[in-house]
Amino acid sequence: MITQLFLALIGLSGGVIVGGGIVALITVLDVIPRFVQITKTEKYLLYYQWSVVLGVLAFMIFDFFSSPLYLPSIVLSFIGIFMGIFVGFLAAALTEVLNVIPILAKRIQVDDYLQFFILALALGKIVGSLFHWLVFIK
């Protein structure tokens, strides 16, 4: 009984730390306001914020109860696409804030080939994800 309570406390603490870190990262990077600014959809800001909150709550509940989703493959494909879009936006916001790519391009002296460098990063991410899901996971 004590062991189970201790493990529950560790799991809850880890979840709070990771969740707090993600919220801090999204807040510091201004992901939602920047996305609204780029797309010029200021009137939908409240919808963006609520979609993030409801998405986090929904997937937290799915993860907490460990119940499988018996949904058609097409629905799961769209969920996966939107998750990938979110991760892509988060990564793009991080690189934009830190100016990682321009600094790296100047350091390794490939300023003229920057578009190929970005394309290689994107293709590497795609190929790595496909390998992970199609080959590595059985």
Image (cartoon, grey):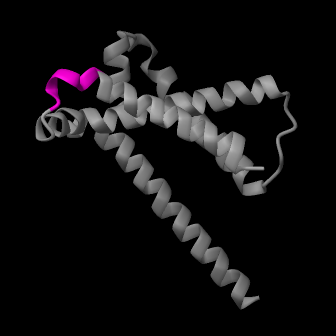
Q: Who is closer to the viewer here, 54 or 69?
A: 69
Question: Magenta residues?
Answer: 110-115
Left or right: residue 114 versus residue 47 is left
Q: Is 61 rendered above or below residue 2? A: above
Q: Who is closer to the viewer here, 89 or 45?
A: 89
Q: Which residue is at 26% across, 32% downward?
A: 96
Q: Who is closer to the viewer here, 84 or 104?
A: 104
- Please state, as top left, top right, bottom left or bottom right, where the N terminus lies in the image: bottom right
What is the x, y in percent for residue 102? 18, 32
Q: Is 2 rendered above or below residue 119? A: below
Corner quadrant of residue 75: top right
Mark yes or no: residue 87 visible. no
Q: Which residue is at 23% across, 39% downward?
A: 100
Q: Is 51 rendered above or below residue 64? A: above
Q: Which residue is at 41% across, 55% downward?
A: 21
Left or right: residue 104 versus residue 119 is left
Q: Which residue is at 49% across, 54% downward?
A: 19
What is the x, y in percent for residue 76? 75, 30
What is the x, y in percent for residue 130? 62, 36
Mark yes or no: residue 65 visible. yes
Left or right: residue 116 versus residue 61 is left
What is the x, y in percent for residue 18? 48, 59
User: Does 52 appear in magenta?
Assistant: no
Which secondary structure type mostly characterizes the magenta part of the structure? helix
Q: How many marks?
A: 0
Corner quadrant of residue 113: top left
